[in-house]
Amino acid sequence: MRSHSGTSDDGPAYPFDETCTARAVIDGAGIVVEWNEGARRLLGHAPADVVGRPAAKLLAPDAGEPRPPAADNRWTGTLALRHDDGGTLRVRLLAHRRRPELGDRSDWLVVTPLENGTLAGQDEALAAAFLDQSPCATAIFDERLRLRRVNAVMAEALGLPEEHIRGLRIPEIGGRPQNEELEGHMLRVLRTGRREDVQTYLGTAPAGRAQAWLARMAPLTDAGGRVRGICLSAHDFTEQYLARERLQLVNEASIRIGSTLDVTRTAQELADVCVPALADFVSIDLVDPPDRGGEPYVGPVLAPVRLRRAAHRSVNPGDPESVVKRGEADTYPAGSPQADSLLAGRTIVAADAATTLAEWLVWDPARADRVRELGIHSTMSVPVQARGATLGVAVFTRFRRPDPFTADDVLLAEEVTARAAVCIDNARRFSRERETAIALQRSLLPRSLPRTAAVEAASRYLPAAQAGVGGDWFDVIPLSGMRVAMVVGDVVGHGLQASATMGRLRTAVRTLADIDLAPDELLTHLDDLVVRLSAEAGGEGVTGEVGATCLYAVYDPVSRRCTLARAGHPPPLMLPPGGPPEEIDVPPGPPLGLGGLPFESTELRLAEGTVLALYTDGLVESRERDLDKSRALLFRALARASGSLDETCHDILQSLLPSTGASDDVALLLARTKGLPSSQVATWEVPADPALVGPVRKQVVGQLAAWDVSEAAFTTELVVSELVTNAIRYGERPIRLRLIHDAATLIVEVSDSSHTAPHLRRAKTFDEGGRGLLLVAQLTQRWGSRHTTEGKTIWAELVFGDDRGDGEVVAEPQLRESGAEPEERESGEG
């Protein structure tokens, strides 16, 4: 059989002669799966006679059985092999696993050169001296890229003597993909005659570790300039490479860790960054706070330590190395890597599976079995600490990478973990502040909306997904005369300060509403309050940035009229019965806090069953779409309102807000108006004559009998007597008495033209008057006064039946204790 060199006048085209190497592949079961022409030339056996049969049949009877160490992926030695002619041939073989990661299941590539060439020429001795004495790892390949010479440094780097590998190509020496890539570069140098530098990995025999090499390849030419071979010099730059890798990992950690203010996500980012760059498996276990929203643990750590798995990551899919699932808590006793590192307050490395690591795992047989099964040989436990607080521990494990953790690995792990610890602590602080703010805000918002005769209401509040809670609020406030106030507001900013300001404004609105101010007047007083809050927030004479918007509406079910005013707030919508949604034209008004600018109100009559929609701007303002599209979506969602207002609230939020949550706080209040029939309202014009109070009381008793609420007649008669008598004595004409009845509530209203407000005082023992309003306060659930354009109205609310409150007094013995006899009230004295 003729071998060819693959050369021509134009240079080498394909320099490889496959028949110059005897090559066979033996699988993990010892069966020959490949047999090349070189092997046939060496032993005379045809491929059909060998492939598929045990490789042991090729051994001579006295050859013995080669037993390469189980941990090695390469073997070299001399064996006696059977030749096809019946003779015995002693051959030096080189064998290495083609896929070391498969272990015993990997195929073995067995090779031996058929030629051992040497350099020719009169300068061979000088060249040999140069090679042997050079401090650089150097190898010389011929024009067929077969190894001809290596110096001592290269032989040491390869882990094989020259006589064992002379005549082999690089892929046949190492068998790794990097070797084939390196040979490709050598072929290009052979063809072009130009030098090349390549950074690559080559295995070293002593430790089986991968090292980084800079391979410099130069063509070797003869006197005529013809390329006759390749000179390869390899320079070990593993330390520089690892330093660059460590720097890259630190840089990547600074970018990837802490992308969100979420504790679990941040811990997972730490694990993701370190696998596989630093370890084959990483777990992060965190200390649970003492209580919900509590501070991190700052005292000394005591064993056993209870930790909760926040995150883990493995090079293997499914994380089979993890004994604890994410979110589960486990207790680590003294002697475990987690507890020992926390007790010591520093990083602890166990790099000896037979001693230190085995002692650590005595406490947990399940973990010990997993360590033996996976071949874990090195563990590094790093405390997660930030700002003097112990947050948890990160455990780094190696089982696929053969090298143990080094001192540089410890520094790298500590650097990356320290960065992650600060991010985790920031996330925890943010979570605590957010939970505190949410708790504060929810405590300031109404837990449930009151049931009133004026409206049926439903509401929703959603804090911002990322920005934290803000100052959005809503409220439904019962007013006198069965009326109800509805308010929605929004304080500028987010966080605890905004929530606290919201609480102050909501309290102010309820206080101002309690004195029955008109909507535009209420906003004026609220504007003054925000101006004062801004001055207080600024300090040292500098005005702070405190601002808010507000919408205030008052609905009267008797007249079915609604009065609205707004201060820089989005206008409300209404859905009339059987009609499409429409926007209510309310004068915009300036935002609260500007000071000195007027507010205007508008009044409209609403049909019974009209749905009012009051909301904050977080509902319609979005980065994904403009305001007009959001408002169109709101109109369509409101138009779909059928029965339940709760379902309508849910539908509106689902239609307008993204699944990831709102970018700003959202407050939504829906109210369906009710009307009070005229049959439940009775009105009398009262003459300004004290002698006519008695007939008025009788008319009231008759009206109560018509309403079938005679059980309230006694108390109502006394209240009417006191209020009407006071209006006659101290008020101005005309005087009007109105009774409003709904379910178990009765309201007595007496109006006159005087703007002087009454006040409650305690009468002395011998005073002839002054007990009227005190008596009214004792007899009724609540009472008060409100100013109107015509004067004032004194009102009192009585609750009877099952809805009677604890403060209501209706029994006759209690009346006598207060010093009033029923018969005495006929005089109409106040």
Image: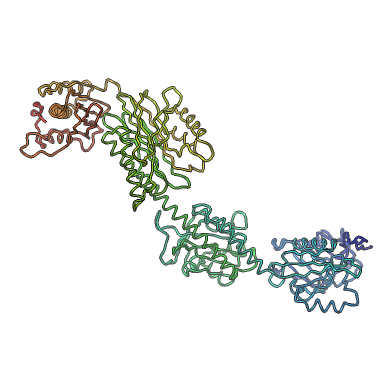
In front of the other: 504 or 468: 504
Q: Is residue 193 left or right of residue 70?
A: right
Can you say whether 714 is above or below 155 in the image?
A: above
Q: Is residue 448 visible?
A: yes
Query: Residue sitting at 52 percent across and 67 percent down?
Result: 337
- Quarter location, residue 778: top left
Query: Residue sitting at 31 percent across and 27 percent down?
Result: 556
Q: How is the image coloured?
A: rainbow
Locate residue 162, reporting x and y percent.
81, 74
Quadrant where the N terminus sits is bottom right
Can you say whether 3 is above or below 639 in the image?
A: below
Q: Is residue 492 left or right of residue 364?
A: left
Q: Residue furthest left?
A: 766
Locate residue 514, reporting x and y percent.
27, 36
- Quarter location, residue 372: bottom right
Quadrant where the C terminus sits is top left
Q: Is residue 112 visible?
A: no
Locate residue 561, reporting x and y percent.
33, 25
Query: Residue sitting at 86 percent across and 67 percent down?
Result: 229
Q: Residue furthest right?
A: 2
The mark total stands at 0
Can you say whether 763 is above or below 79 in the image?
A: above
Q: Is residue 772 left or right of residue 389?
A: left
In front of the other: 364 or 626: 626
Q: Is residue 570 left or right of residue 169?
A: left
Locate residue 281, reporting x and y percent.
59, 60
